[in-house]
Image: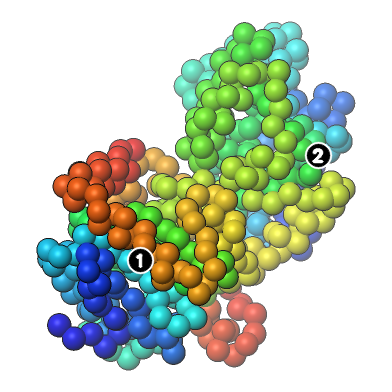
Amino acid sequence: MTYETLEVRADGPVGWLAFNRPEAGNAIDARMFVELEAAWAELEADTSVRAIVNTGNGDSFQTGLDMKQLSTDPGALRASSRQTREFALRMTSWHCGVTKPVVAAVNGTCAGGGLHFVADADIVIAAEDATFLDPHVSVGQVSAFETIGLLKKAPMEPVARMALMGVHERLSAARAHQLGIVSEMVAAEALCDRAGSVARRLAEQDPAALRAIKQAFWNALEAP
Amino acid sequence: MSYEHLIVERHGPVGWLINDRPDVRNAMNSAMRDEFAAAWTELDDDPGVRVIVHTGNGRDFQTGVDVGEIASDGVGMERYRRSMEDFDVHFTSWHQGVWKPVITAVNGICCGGGFHWVADSDIVIAASDAQFFDPHTSVGQVVAIEAIGLMKKMPVETVMRMAFMGRYERMGAERAYELGMISEIVDPPDRLRERAQELAETVARNSPAAMAATKKALWGALETGLTDACRQGAQHLVSMWGHPDQTEGPAAFAERRDPDWQSL
């Protein structure tokens, strides 16, 4: 498939899924909403791909749903509303049931719905100048899925603070690293190289073992 | 209502609940326990209050139950025991179902039962000289509820260590910050209230209804697994659809003005 809003490619055993609407902070428009599901499926099905890197082109990593664009496309708005209401989203690797290891490489601003891709990845690394924020409550929206995912994996207080501060505060990459939301912080220009080498190392492991570990760990989050 | 052991104040959109038994390091007796229940409800019901700050008067934040008084007043102990057996307690914002954002500002020592208010609030900041420890086991008591609440929200090892070390070890604000038990250290310590007010005013700039629904989604997630939590979160998320704040938010943003939110 050809993609307009994503850059999807295989580089040896490493699959790359890069958000590619840099002029719009990589926000998810109607087109990207559909392409994400297709891209995860394609990388999951490609037997040469053993690990996947998810990053963003341009200054931002991902800034969530592009509500302005979506509201001009009634069909897409209806689909996203239905998927939200029923929690039947198909945006992240977790939503789409990807069984291969996923490394999120946060290259810049990660806002609101962008946090989905941090919460739902297996390994998260970030550029030193990456920042995290959750603007939902500042525009009258509820923060739920992304921050629920994060609080299952990281200390809750900083996650709740991010949700309640809205646009008025950002979490730095350094603080996210300290809290264990990301495991590695690298210079911005070295991020892609480092993400690629982490993914290549994962690709050297036994795929069946990684798949079993991934399934066991994510299942463990399903216990009350 | 007037309070003997608490001070309830309002500063702008911020409601303050201040522990006020400084002579006994703000330990909670039976009367104070009843006052907590009333004070949380009073602030939650006040449409002028958008965010609540909780702190302590005197040197220390809170040091748990006033065991001396509860054991000797003839009714306190039996009442306390029964309420714990039934987990029928009403002294924190979580117990009282407060869905406004709650900020705990820890001054000085927070020990034993004091952790209830750390575990049960949304945002926790502390003065740089704050200290945390859990003396229950050093006096032959079991710690359960407040430690269970904490370990749902932060690394478990730290909570277990505090529970087992009792009064023989204290954790400083710096370590609490590193671990994500608190999100900010205020230095010098005497700036704590000023900073808490400032932080609360910032939170108060966000949609009250959206924050209440967000709180329900996040606290609900502690009760269940990831997928179920997201399904329940979806209900809270959808509950805001059609709310006036959802058009007011983007409109205010486009017009570069402060939003005029609906009161809860």
Tell me residue A101's x, y (percent): 27, 56
Seen from the viewer's position, the closer of residues A69 and B258 is: A69
The kind of residue tagged 2 is Asp
Q: Do labels 1 and 2 share a chain?
A: no
Residue A135 vertical placement versus B15 (above, below): below
Residue A89 vertical placement versus B168 (above, below): below
Residue B245 vertical placement versus B252 (above, below): above
Tell me residue B170's x, y (percent): 71, 27
Give yes or no for contact between labels 1 and 2 (Cβ–Cβ under 8 Å): no
Chain name for mark 2: B
Which residue does the numbered mark 1 point to in the structure image?
A196
Identify the residue at horizontal 58%, vertical 38% (top origin).
B119
> Which quadrant of the rendered structure holds the C terminus of chain B?
bottom right
Mark 1 or 2: the one toward you: 1
Is A148 left or right of B126, judged from the image as shown? left
Residue A146 visible to an observer of this rendering: no
Tell me residue B85's x, y (percent): 49, 18
Q: Is mark 2 on a helix, strand or loop?
A: loop
How many residues crowd mark 2 within 10 Å: few (<14), some (14–19), many (20+)? Answer: some
